[in-house]
Image (cartoon, helix red, strand yellow):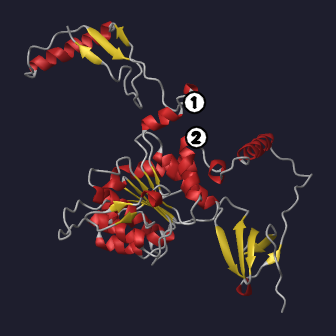
Amino acid sequence: MNRPSFGPGAIIAARNRLWRVDAHEGQVLLATAIDAGESRQRRFYIPHEVIRSARLARPSADVVGFPAAQDLLLRAYRLSLLHGTAPLLSLQRSRVIPKDYQLVPVVMALETPRIRMLIADDVGLGKTIEAGLIITELMARQMASRLLVIVPANLREQWREALDYFFHISARIISTRHQRQMERELPAGSNPWSHYRCLITSVDYAKQPAIRNQILEQRWDMPLIDEAHQVAKPHQSGPDQRVRMDRWELTEVLSSSQRVHHLLLLTATPHNGYTDCFASLLRMLYVDAVDGPVHMPRIVRRAARRHVCQRRRQDVEEWFKGDPNRSPFPTRDQQEVIIAPSQYEAEAVRAVGGQRLRDGWPPGLPAAGVVRARRGWPFERPRTSLPLSTLQVG
């Protein structure tokens, strides 16, 4: 019996949906749904599927649409044409407008079939953006679908918001409290670790033996570990000294697992002064970047430079030195501006000073006077009109 042949780009109907054929390999058909927002590629085993040729319905001239919807459609087409010229698919599918230096890790990642990287840029250079671009690029190229983000507990919500807002990746936070809620939402017997494709968890939750075993049972295309210096091996002064740390053991087992393909390590402080601790991070990449015994390792620079991206802020400033208008860092203005307080503010300062004396504070504090505000200091979300003011009462 002759089976139908579907070439790449053909439209098919299967499982009550429309699909675009991406590849036809023997009895297996790879296709992506085109009637929904999900872009995940699926496999169809042709002998067991009901597949037929299909086509998209032509728009009817008798149906009058809405001008507002038409305007949105035209704008979407313009944006798709604009972003469609980008050389990287991650730039087409994210809200990020990256700086030139932030594209370097993406290019480095695409040069290797198995991405194992340590991104060790300074604080403020955008490691989250760089890692998000790599993840989005792999997902757009159908090279990754399951993501596990392991971070300190205080960064879980920040990572969830960044992935959702900048890269349109819907990730769920999983912890003891969140897992109970997830299990109520899932069918009986379902495992949250296998059901959700993108999960964010804390390193201290993941290192628990029961949770670690559940993580290792799953296949992960891209584990990402932020603040990776916290999972480095403790310093070992001699060959006979035995060291142990749950965080390090978790990461060591995860990075060496056959169920894990890619791996990203992020940290602004990869080196704590001990070479063996830094080398333990490079060993997790499994790219032959470390030689020698565990307590006295030797870094193989030729192998490491292809998998380590580390820039200091002064390196980036030097890069943009020829064109200061393109520098990503604002110029700091240290000019001091003296602002006379209003009557209401002066009375408030006097009232606080009087209360301090009544509460037993030292009487040497001068009474009301001048509010000094320094202009141009970097800060986020000012809570008052003078967030960095120093009050001198006199």
Which residue is labeled 2 in the image? Answer: 100
Crowd rating for badge 2 (residues with CA inside 10 Å; few <14, some 14–19, many 20+): few
In this view, 277 is above or below 23 = above
The residue furthest bottom is: 1
Rendered location of residue 42, percent (x, y): 66, 72
Rendered location of residue 324, percent (x, y): 55, 26
Asked whether the beta carbons under mark 2 and mark 1 sit within 8 Å of each other, the answer is yes
The span from disc 2 to disc 1 (Cα, nearest Å) is: 10 Å
Q: Nearer the viewer, residue 321 or 232?
A: 321
User: SS for tag 2?
Assistant: helix
Label at residue 79: none
Residue lying at 29% horizontally and 60% vertically, measured from the top left:
276
Which residue is labeled 1 in the image? Answer: 326
Rendered location of residue 215, percent (x, y): 40, 71
Residue lying at 42% horizontally and 76% vertically, measured from the top left:
217
Q: Nearer the viewer, residue 287 or 150?
A: 287
